Image (tube, grey):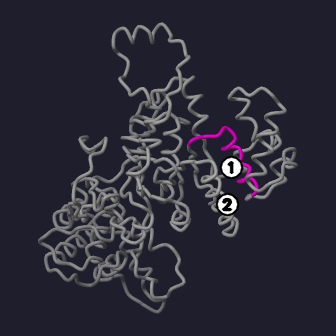
Amino acid sequence: MSDDREPVLSVRGLKKHYPVTKGILRREVGRVKAVDGIDFTLYEGETLGLVGESGCGKSTAATSLLRLEEPTDGEVIYHGEVPEDTNRKTPMEKLRAIRGEEEAREPNDIVGFSRSQLKRFRRKAQMIFQNPTGSFDPRMSVGESVAEPLLIHGLDDTAERREIAEDLLDRVGLDADDYDRYPHEFSGGQKQRVALARALVVNPEFVVADEPVSALDVSIQSEILSLMRDLQDRFGLSMLFISHDMGVIREICDRVAVMYLGEIVEVAPTEELFRNPQHPYTQALLASIPTPDPRQRGLGIELTGDVPSPDNPPSGCRFHTRCPKVIQPDDLDLPQEQFRRALDFRHQVEGGDVDADGAAELARARRSDAATGDITRDDRRRALRAEFDLPDELDDPTAEESVAAAVDSVLDDDLESAADRLSDTFSTVCEREKPALERTDEDHVAACHLVDGTETVETATSEVADD
């Protein structure tokens, strides 16, 4: 599909980092890497889904590419007509231009647009927000809210603005008479229809929809998605559709980009992605979709644990701390789930989240009320292993020797020795090396060490070392 259509928007190496500051002087001590070098292209007339768990950076990517907040780095290339720059340069800007100190950017890079260019560009790009209630001014009628973008972009005729807004309200399934009603008089689904009308009132080329149906009942979700498809066909729109719900993504999107912890890990046509997911994270997301077929239940990958903090993302593949298919070293021969559990144990030890007192508490909690006598060292060993679902003996002798020694070191409050022993045995290429995007099919790419691609896909961040 992508080969037959012209691109509308090309995102290259987009980053949005938030500084972490400390003290009265607000000294920067770190950065939250909410979006960390993503690449994708939105094509004419398509709906591209951006999917991932909450906290993975989807909404920040949306606001950054539209410059509702300023990106830290990257390019957002708009392939339409570049708006004229009517801003007058300040003396300092003129001086920097003479000295050649201005940052060299493509003329159609939105990140470099001036204020006047950005205002004109926003006639071409609109956004629909997750919470329709919070996106309306309760003091304005819904008609005034729909018509307001027309006023901002220079349409001063009140009667004409009202006529256009009433027509849009009718097109989204409401009545023209609703123009004078207020947001509190509408249901959630009706408010989202009004939000659609407001987004379309300036006749944009593309729309960014950020979780537009997540706050709605399932029956209303279906109606809004159907309406969005109809409006897209009628107005010839391109759409970036953001969601955490794979079922919704499948219903409306032509292609899907899967995002995890600030990075895109897989991109494919929708049906190809659902039929043949390559990245373990994508497989886990698909496995979370409820299915009425009992034969399909429990066959997928279970996604456990929380998304790590973006202020200190894991090295290598950022999913390796949760991945059920994390690659074990060649000299180990363990069932995959045993290696995953041993790796979890190692991470907890390295983080200082396991100690001798905690093991004793676990052992006491496991005892029956009728049990008597002191808690023994063996009790604490068994309790600690049980906490991480480690069997009494691992299948690989080398692995078992390391875990047993590490458990004893924990019980002796020697966490450094325990961590060293575990890291020597339970290491993985997934934490040492960042996987490149590999092409597995013409329109299918994934970033995983398990993927055997036909070629490596060059991205804006391909040559940048993982920091």
Q: Are marks 2 and 1 in contact (CB under 8 Å)?
A: yes
Q: Quadrant of the N terminus?
A: bottom left
Q: Is residue 204 magenta?
A: yes
Q: Amino acid at mark 2?
A: Ile
Mark 2 nearby-residue class (10 Å; few <14, some 14–19, many ≥20): many
Q: Position of residue 149 (x, y in %)?
A: 70, 35
Cα gap from disc 2 to disc 1, whole angstroms: 9 Å
The image quarter in which residue 27 lies: top left
Residues in magenta? 190-205
Q: Amino acid at mark 1?
A: Leu
Is 405 on the left or on the right of 285, as rendered? left
**Does 167 appear above or below 223?**
above
**Does 257 appear above or below 197?**
below
Residue position for label 2: 224
Q: Main secondary structure of the magenta part?
A: helix
Q: Quadrant of the C terminus?
A: top left
Q: Position of residue 159 (x, y in %)?
A: 84, 33
Residue position for label 1: 196
